[in-house]
Image: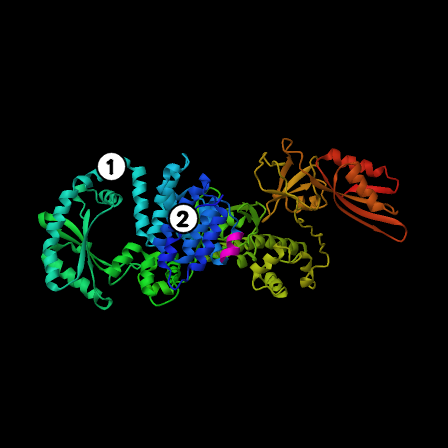
């Protein structure tokens, strides 16, 4: 079905009107051909898309001054989102620049603003820094304008959220970009939806006072015109009524009635002045008016000496006219008026006159929006670099501001020190990332923690936040002192065994011998296990009494790497199931074993079997740290524990495979480790680790292995 070519005349007319030296013609024909390829004008849905294209292109033409890539991107964006035209087709036909703008607009559309009311300023900054090319935001604003004008076509559950987003996000964004017409249209629409009765009331007040207002303006401007004529100025005077939403805002902020709002109506004096004299001419006109009428000095606004970042220039004065009525007077030149009416596009078109880059103003806008609150002059705009902030969503939809380059670990510490110290990584947009992962703008981050996680010195290389680094250093220092306490006790006990006095002389000797900087470092080395207490004896060899008997040093082993899940397996002391505990690797207790708890200085409570080879020593030397413990029969019995078995017997071919088959297939248990070694006498010794849940399964393993004739001995490690 052939579409009617005339339907595209309105869409592409701007190319021909603004085309200089036929620069746009090739793109004009390419875009027209591209649209015709995908659009069926007899299809109702496609007709609606054409209407959307037409209105968005018109908006982009006005707000960007016909900047080619911006307008083409708006056109193609509709095809991609509404008619599912592949983005790769856009890239192939129109290049990376335009396809990036279209992709960026899609990215903005997918951005969620669930709790925008809680921190609107951060949401605004996020939206303005979320894409690399600000033209994506311009296309998105054009789409919002279209949706707003066709609000009745929006699904019934969407208008409230849509209007709220306009109020909290898109109107402020339009304001920051200097798109004042769009900003005003947004604010009027919001008021019509949120305060319809007040809107109707103020609208009626403006209508009923229109005739009187026009007569007053005529009487106010008549003497001004005479003075300007006598001074030889070429000028135009226009009347303007403030937008209803702005009047309502002033009524609320000032706490006054409609009649008391000072600048409900205003006059605009537009001078036909050459560029070199326009500032002086504006100030001369201001002087003429204030000689006739009294100004309110508090409401004087000089946007000529110090233009806004968008390029807006004008003198604003609030004048007390006849009948004690206030009138706002705006004084500007024709150049300034075009910038005020057409925004940044007109500003940079004037500023870059004579340069071939029609999109030069967009580069300046891109700099401007990164931190608009800091800009006062064009020179500052040009000196501004990239934003140093990014914005991260929490799982609850809250938005947090962080420095660019911050990691998952930085974000965890920002939430709370305890979260940071136990952080193991994060779920970022649904994918697990390590603590060193550098966060990107707009990501949703859910921090993962573990009770068994402890900070270490390497984290100082990951953290970028000075505040978080300071917190980590304090934590590491505290951990060092914990190890030092344990180390001090180890050294003291060892010296007592050797019948050496535990005093400053002995500690200084040990400190020097082990090249420690001070006793605290010495204790830390022993407490952390980097120095064995067996190394103390040689230091005092000459001083040890001949009748001294040294007791073998037995220290707690490292914990096993299996972490129970599905419930608390141990009841410690007075049936407390909330104490942090870990299973000792030296004896690998399994449900059903008789057990006890041993409180360590820095690693919580370790659970040992009563028959553990270390049990006797621990109970004799550290009795004050031993606490009762028993298995919680109500806990999840499906979780596995590693039990180790020592085997010996007659070596044979396929021994390892046969034992593996017995455990895995015949007993349907998980074999976690196996180690077999044989000697020249054809005998073997080995160790296997099996994941078990209770004593019954331990017995099954022992009985099954004993039935094998080649296994002579089997004991649980």
Residue 86 location in percent, x, y?
53, 49
Residue, x 65% and y 31% (percent of image)? Answer: 633
Residue 647 location in percent, x, y?
81, 44
Q: Which of 85 and 529 is in front in this view?
A: 85
Q: In this view, does 85 lie to the left or right of 140?
A: right
Disc 1 secondary structure class: helix
Marks 2 and 1, how far apart in space?
Answer: 40 Å
Q: In this view, does 675 lie to the left or right of 486?
A: right
Image: 591 above or below 104: above
Q: Which mark is residue 573?
A: none
Q: Which residue lies furthest to the right in this view?
A: 681
Magenta stretch?
A: 88-94
Q: Which of 689 and 490 is in front in this view?
A: 689
Q: In this view, does 269 lie to the left or right of 432?
A: left
Q: In the figure, residue 315 lies in which quadrant?
A: bottom left
Image: 314 above or below 265: below
Q: Which of 316 and 560 is in front in this view?
A: 316
- What residue does disc 1 label? 200
Crowding around mark 1 (Cα neighbors within 10 Å: few <14, some 14 to 19, many 20+) is some
Q: Which mark is residue 6?
A: 2
Residue, x 50% and y 58% (percent of image)? Answer: 95
The answer, for residue 129, to whether it is visible in the render is no
Magenta-drawn stretch contains 45: no
Magenta-drawn stretch contains 90: yes
Q: Which of 47 and 274 is in front in this view?
A: 47
What is the number of callouts on the image?
2
Disc 2 secondary structure class: helix
Along the polypeptide, which appears first: circle 2 or circle 1? Answer: 2
């Amino acid at each position: 079905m052939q579409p009617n070519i005339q339907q595209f005349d309105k869409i592409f007319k701007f190319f021909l009107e603004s085309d200089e030296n036929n620069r746009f013609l090739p793109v004009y024909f390419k875009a027209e051909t591209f649209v015709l390829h995908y659009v069926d004008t007899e299809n109702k849905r496609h007709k609606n898309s054409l209407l959307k294209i037409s209105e968005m292109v018109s908006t982009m033409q006005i707000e960007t001054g016909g900047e080619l890539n911006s307008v083409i991107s708006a056109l193609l964006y509709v095809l991609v989102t509404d008619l599912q035209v592949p983005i790769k087709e856009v890239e192939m036909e129109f290049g990376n620049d335009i396809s990036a703008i279209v992709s960026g607009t899609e990215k903005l559309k997918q951005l969620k603003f669930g709790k925008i009311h809680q921190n609107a300023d951060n949401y605004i900054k996020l939206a303005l820094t979320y894409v690399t090319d600000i033209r994506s935001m311009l296309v998105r604003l054009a789409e919002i304008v279209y949706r707003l004008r066709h609000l009745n076509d929006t699904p019934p559950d969407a208008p409230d959220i849509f209007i709220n987003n306009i109020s909290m996000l898109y109107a402020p964004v339009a304001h920051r970009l200097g798109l004042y017409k769009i900003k005003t249209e947004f604010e009027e629409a919001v008021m019509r939806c949120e305060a319809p009765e007040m809107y109707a009331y103020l609208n009626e007040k403006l209508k009923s006072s229109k005739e009187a207002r026009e007569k007053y303006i005529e009487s106010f401007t008549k003497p001004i015109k005479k003075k300007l004529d006598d001074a030889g100025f070429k000028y135009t005077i226009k009347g303007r009524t403030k937008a209803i939403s702005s009047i309502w805002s002033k009524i609320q902020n000032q706490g006054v009635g409609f009649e008391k709002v000072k600048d409900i109506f205003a006059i605009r004096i537009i001078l036909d002045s050459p560029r070199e004299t326009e500032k002086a001419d504006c100030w001369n006109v201001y002087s003429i008016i204030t000689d006739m009428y009294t100004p309110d000095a508090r409401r004087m606004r000089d946007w000529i000496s110090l233009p806004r970042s968008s390029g807006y220039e004008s003198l604003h004065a609030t004048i007390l006219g006849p009948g004690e009525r206030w009138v706002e007077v705006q004084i500007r030149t024709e150049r300034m008026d075009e910038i005020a009416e057409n925004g940044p596009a007109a500003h940079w078109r004037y500023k870059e006159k004579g340069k071939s880059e029609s999109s030069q103003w967009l580069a300046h806008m891109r700099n401007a929006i990164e931190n608009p609150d800091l800009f006062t002059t064009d020179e500052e705009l040009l000196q501004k670099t990239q934003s140093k902030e990014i914005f991260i969503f929490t799982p609850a939809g809250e938005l947090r501001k962080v420095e660019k380059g911050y990691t998952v670990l930085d974000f965890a510490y920002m939430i709370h020190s305890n979260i940071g110290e136990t952080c193991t990584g994060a779920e970022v947009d649904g994918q697990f990332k390590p603590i060193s992962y550098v966060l990107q703008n707009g990501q949703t981050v859910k921090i993962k923690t573990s009770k068994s996680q402890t900070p270490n010195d390497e984290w100082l290389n990951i953290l970028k936040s000075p505040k978080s680094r300071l917190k980590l250093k304090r934590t590491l220092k505290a951990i060092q002192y914990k190890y030092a306490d344990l180390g001090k006790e180890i050294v003291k006990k060892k010296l007592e065994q050797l019948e050496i006095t535990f005093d400053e002389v002995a500690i200084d000797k040990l400190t020097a011998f082990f090249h420690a900087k001070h006793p605290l470092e010495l204790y830390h080395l022993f407490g952390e296990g980097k120095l064995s207490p067996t190394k103390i004896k040689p230091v005092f060899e000459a001083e040890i009494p001949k009748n001294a008997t040294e007791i073998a040093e037995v220290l707690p082993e490292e914990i096993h790497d299996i972490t129970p899940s599905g419930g608390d397996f141990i009841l410690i002391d007075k049936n407390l199931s909330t104490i942090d505990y870990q299973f000792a690797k030296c004896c690998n207790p399994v449900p059903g074993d008789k057990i006890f708890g041993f409180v360590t200085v820095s690693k919580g409570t370790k659970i040992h079997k009563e028959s553990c080879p270390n049990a006797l020593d621990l109970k004799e030397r550290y009795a004050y740290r031993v606490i009762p413990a028993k298995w919680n029969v109500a806990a999840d019995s499906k979780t596995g524990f590693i039990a180790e078995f020592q085997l010996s017997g007659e070596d044979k071919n396929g021994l390892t495979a046969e034992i593996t088959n017995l455990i895995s297939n015949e007993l349907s248990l998980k074999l976690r480790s196996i180690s077999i070694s044989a000697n020249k006498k054809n005998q073997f010794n080995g160790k296997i680790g099996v994941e078990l849940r209770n004593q019954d399964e331990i017995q099954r393993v022992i009985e099954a292995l004993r039935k094998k004739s080649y296994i002579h001995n089997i004991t649980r490690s």
